Image: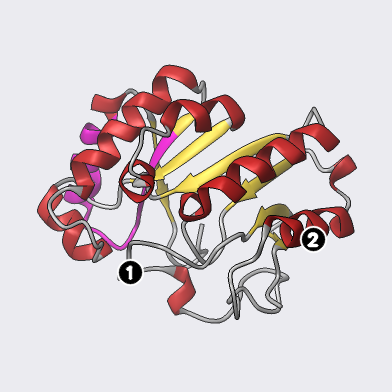
Amino acid sequence: MADIVYSLDGGTYLNITNKCPCNCAFCIRSKGDAVGEASMLWFDKEPTFDEIKSAIDDYDFTNIDNAIFCGYGEPTNAYDNLIKTAKYLKEINPDIKLRLNTNGLSDLINNKPTAKELSMLFDAISVSLNEPTSEKYDKITRNIYQCKAFDAMLKFTKECVKYCKDVRMTVVDVISEEEIKQAKEVCASTGAKFKVRSFERGR
């Protein structure tokens, strides 16, 4: 069984699915089978909520201040389990701060608006912008929604900004300085904060 809860650079992470509609050229999961203190992040089969709950109980979240949903898949690809898990964590530790790291394609994945519900549960949402244009975005993310994904991701982010106080968009430093500058301008149009992530650090 793969690790559902793992530690990385002092942070606590939840890996609840390996499914993802993207196959990003720079994805950290292409570098190995695990990161941080995890031994394996690839599942033989997708975990059930009961298995996720059991892993949380074994880890003991009662004294954990922050937790991040970010594993070897897109968390919103396991939307029901994501919602249940976030609610469960808030139940056992009402003071815990939760962050969702997402590609922002949840509405396409789940065929419904999801930003408001997610924003009500998560204290912070980080959306992977990756590139400043739809064409470049499709090329680097190699997503299954070609031509629709970029606009859907921007719309999702704008909706999150309405309901969540801490929303950021990120790019990885594998793109050019000019593209990073352009991406920052795109991010500004959504009202979200902007962050450049390090490919080498994987964060």
Q: Counting other residues with Cα less than 10 Å from the Cα at mark 1, is it few (<14), some (14-19), or many (20 or more)?
A: some
Between residue 133 and residue 195, name the one nearer to us.
Answer: 133
Q: Counting other residues with Cα less than 10 Å from the Cα at mark 2, is it few (<14), some (14-19), or many (20 or more)?
A: some
Find disc 2 in the rendering and name its residue: 55
Magenta-drawn segment: 168-187
In the image, taking residue 68 as reference, residue 23 lies left or right, namely left
Residue 45: give x, y in percent of width and height.
Answer: 59, 75
Please name the amino acid that badge 1 sits on: Asn
Q: Which mark is residue 57?
A: none
In the image, taking residue 3 as reference, residue 187 lies left or right, namely left
Rendered view: 36 above or below 127 = below
Helix, strand or loop status at disc 1? loop
Find disc 1 in the rendering and name its residue: 23
Quarter the N terminus occupies: bottom right
Rendered view: 89 above or below 58 = above
Quarter of image, res 199? bottom left
Q: Nearer the viewer, mark 2 or mark 1?
A: 2
